[in-house]
Amino acid sequence: MGADARRDSPAGTQAARRVGRRRLLVDSAVLAAGTAAWPMLSRASAAFAAPVAGARPNYNAALTVALGAPVTSLDPAVPTSTLAETVKRSMYEGLVDLDASGGLRPGLATRWTVSPDGTVWTFFLRPRVTFQDGTRFDASAVKASLDRLVDPSQKLPYHYLFDMIDSVDVVDSLTVRIKTKTPYGAMLPHLASEAALIISPAALRRYGKDIATHPVGTGAYSFSSQIPGQSITVKRFEHYWAGRPYLSSVTFTAVSEDATRVAQLETNQAQVIVNVPPSEIQRLRGRPGVTVAVREGNRVAHIGINVQKDPLTDRRLRQALNFAVDRGGLVEGLLRGLGTPADSFVAPITWGYAAQPIYRYDPARAKQLLAAAGYPNGFHTTIWTPQGRYPQDKETAVAVQGQLAQIGVQAQVQVIEWARYLDLLRKPLDQNTVHLYLLAWESGTGEIGFVADLVFRSSEWPPKGWNTMFYKNPQVDALVAKGDETVDQATRKQVYADVQRLVVNDAPWLFLFTYRQVLGLRSNVHGLIALPSEAFDLRQTWVG
Amino acid sequence: MAWAGGIVGLVIVVALLAPWLAPYSPIAQNLRDVAQPPSVRHPLGTDQLGRDLLSRVIYGARTSLVIGAAVLAIAFTVGTAIGFAAGWFGRWVDETLMRAVDVLMAFPEILLAIAVVAALGPGLANTMVAVGVSSTPRFARLARAVVLSLREETYVEAARAAGAGEWRLLRHHVLPNSVSVLLVQATLLVAIAIQAAAGLGFLGLGAQPPRAEWGVMLVDSRTYISTAPWLLTAPGLALMVTVMAFNFLGDGLQDVLAVRIS
Amino acid sequence: MSRFLARRLLALVPVLVGVSIVVFLILHLVPGDPAEVIAGTGTTGEGIEAIRHQLGLDRPLAEQYFKWAGRLLRADLGRSLVTQQAVLPQLLYRFGNTLKLAVGGMAFALLVGGAWGIVAAVHRGSMWDHIFTVIALAGVSMPIFWLGLLLMLVFAVQLQLVPATGMGGPATFVLPVATLGLNATALVSRIARSSLLEVLQQPYVRTAWAKGLSQPRVLWRHMLSNAAIPIITVGALQFGYLLGGAVLTETVFVWPGLGRLLVDAIMQRDYPVVQGGILLVALTLIALNVATDLLYALVDPRIRYQ
């Protein structure tokens, strides 16, 4: 969904690729030591619902998960939505795994090393793992999956994440060596992304391009059936390497109506639903058998400002817009408190975040700035918004419009469907007609560099990248480049603090808020691990 | 029928006098006062942005009537013109026009409307065009049928025998005599148009915010169905009663004018 | 009759070609790009180009149309751009589900509406007749999605009598069928009422009444023959309408039907699905019209076709 969460993560261009290095990465040697097998049953803190004393897993239980949008492709190499990632990760696994806090941990590789010059990675694979079709998981399987991504002639959408790879070599049956053309810091986050989930080589040979509808991985559940656009069912993989999974099957359904999803949870037609509307939380909490789980999110809602469009070229006007919006009111009124007013372009839980609380709600100040810029009576503009893409998206645009009207800025709200929305936002400058637009970026890698690279560098103007504000500040460009190359984490954090200071002051966004994620669960569902993106990990989930 | 006419009249009056009748601006927000139940200050409560619901329902009458009128204008003019031309001139005119109408009739109206909105982009004006376009074939067919039956009538035959020109026949004989049939259909069409526009709103393709439109109001508050049902009942009832009044009126007219549509 | 049929069928050809061109053009000239939808915000310009190329969307429009039309002649509707599934089986599955709803709604309408109309006619002018008339008009005037949500709230969430959504056992059919069938029910009730009233006006019936006799069988037969033409007409018209109304009903009840599929496909610019789906619907409606004309002739010997 949205500026599609994890899809955003391994985004972009050469430099964007270098972004992902999170603090753990630097310590990968440490991490790699002594992590033979992670315990299956450590489902405590990270899990949404804590285990209940006396509850026992019911091995006959099936689970229905109501997602907000249909899952379009099950091919790991094709970007889809965060929600589709949940489905893919129930069937597939990668060399590197993600934990609930967004950290990296061993997955199908038990440990790894990197050469001093940073161009040779060696992965030691987990023994005694089989794919759901009986194929043995080994080095050649890893090579087949990665070669497919690396090969440009396959024309896979996720190819760009791996074109830095020079070769993938089988050292022995349980050792793989990956050579890169240049030192490459973000190797591990890329391998942890959904793009690098490992596919059965036999299935790849057999189905070729049709692998999207015949997924075969090593994960806890194997593909069972699909009604396109409607539902996907996966069933327990009895020979899963980490032990017999608890659930007999999981069905993912696409239920776009909020009210319908809630009704399904209440009638136990679905045991897990995503995006509970804020207005329903209070009531649902009072229902027996239903749990509402809330967690901080990574996604920052904002109104992007096309800074090349008159009169928005004037920084004072953009600052005026920022002073005119009552973020606390938006969070309280629209999100029922399920959010945090934004004071940077990343969320507080994102690594590298540094608060820049300079825009307190101050309509008088906003009017002064308008007057100083020569628009004492405001001006006319438009706000574009998608509908149903983010929680309360259209309502947010309307609320902002109402608040801008208070300082004399007359904005017209235009709802545009997603297919056209992205198309219009990504037009090159000379054809671009956007003024203000609502979007919500999430740092898919869990750290600030991702968004800084993809959205704020001047080299990322559409149609190439996602700098849909057409923002350009040479200082920001230089600092972001420096952040990419800096290895010392403390220094790096300082660099990004400077980036945030500059960007917030330049105000290419009207900063709004970060969303909290709200899942609805039946109370007897345990061990569901939510990843920092909106995807979740069902491998340890059980029903009591 | 009298009361149906009364309600239609009332809706029209409310729509015209909206600025004087509404206690608040329909777009004035108060984010600290959202989804409140009915009270003295807000007789129908407030909506999800803290706007006064009564004011929005009142202004919604305006929007719905504008939609109904615009759709009527489009479908009536274009449809009648096509139908009259096809029915009157017959032969290849009829053949060509009716094949074109067949092409449009081959789509369910709502899908046709959705396709048109997808092409033009959502919005009130485009909604009107979409519903108008999708209702046109129905009118064209009806008008053609009316003309076909009228041209066989003896007084038309007589006028023709007396040497009346084609246009004169159309203007003085066919048009006046088809008014009652078309009037009934027009009344019913307003009801259909208001409902269809609301349906487009439900699919996210209707009037643009912050304009008050009953269908969109219903749609926007559907997640409040169990926590703040008044958000749905007020615009829902207004929509239903208005549509019903137009339906009743059309029905009544049909009886009064003794129209038989076959 | 067979000449009439042949002529009707021949006249279909230009209509179908027209429909296919209209559908194709509307979609392809609309701004918006399926490649963008597939990629979301996850990839850059080159990634989107790669997807576009993979899907053949970088070819000239005419070439795309003729390629599609050529395959169409071999009953191959291609593959969905978004899901990569073959279009035809997907459409037929969804269409089947919509038909279940539509047929269910129609049956509901005939049974409930028929009975309702008879009761109203028999008690003509009574309070019940008035109440029924008002309810029937209210039924026609009810926004279908509002009705659906209200029914869901009452019967699924509050009373927990039936499942809220989804398609499964017979219980899952109750709410969507009732929602979809309501408008048709109201209409049928009005036709049944007026047809019966007309029969009751007949001299021989009045004579029978005057003699204190009631002949249910005669009454029934006359009413049926009287009502047959309007009911067939309304049935055919309503069926098309039901297919359209199914879009909203399917959205509310998450019914895996054709209507919802088409709306989503239009929004996602999934060209092959929309093109195939609309053709399918168009074909059905056209077939229905032809069948209706033939039925007229069968039911009413006065109608002849030259």
Image (cartoon, coloured by chain):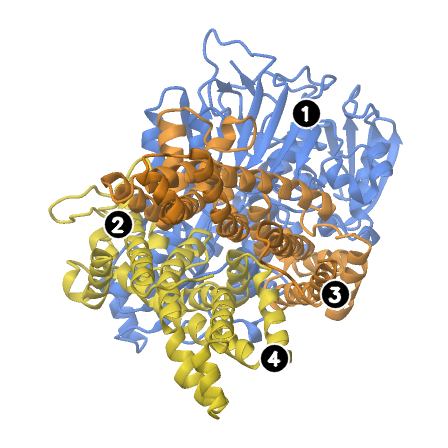
Chain colours: A blue, B yellow, C orange
Are the residues flagged by discs 2 and 4 from a single subunit? yes
Are the residues flagged by discs 2 and 3 from a single subunit? no
**Mark 2 belongs to which subunit?**
B
- Disc assigned to residue B258: none
The residue to which callout 1 is attached is: A221
Are the residues flagged by discs 4 and 1 from a single subunit? no
Vertical order, A75 against B195 (above or below): above
- Disc assigned to residue C65: 3
Residue A457 vs residue A140: left or right?
Answer: left
Foreground of the two, B193 or C129: C129
- Mark in the foreground, 2 or 4: 4
* Number of residues whose C-alpha sits closer than 10 Å to that of mark 4, classed few (under 14), some (14–19) or many (20 or more): some
Q: Amino acid at mark 3?
A: Tyr
Q: Secondary structure at mark 2?
A: loop
Q: Amino acid at mark 4?
A: Val
Residue A35 rendering spot, x and y as whole percentages: 67, 22
Cα separation, mark 1 vs mark 2, equals 45 Å
The residue to which callout 2 is attached is: B31
Residue A514 is at least partly visible in this image: no
C-beta proximity under 8 Å, tags 2 and 3: no
Residue A134 rendering spot, x and y as whole percentages: 82, 23
Q: Secondary structure at mark 3?
A: helix
The residue to which callout 4 is attached is: B93
* Number of residues whose C-alpha sits closer than 10 Å to that of mark 1, classed few (under 14), some (14–19) or many (20 or more): many
Cα separation, mark 2 vs mark 4, equals 59 Å
Cα separation, mark 4 vs mark 1, equals 63 Å
Cα separation, mark 1 vs mark 3, equals 41 Å
Hey, which quadrant is residue C66 in on the image? bottom right
**Mark 1 belongs to which subunit?**
A
Q: Amino acid at mark 2?
A: Leu
Quadrant of the image for the N terminus of chain A? Answer: top right
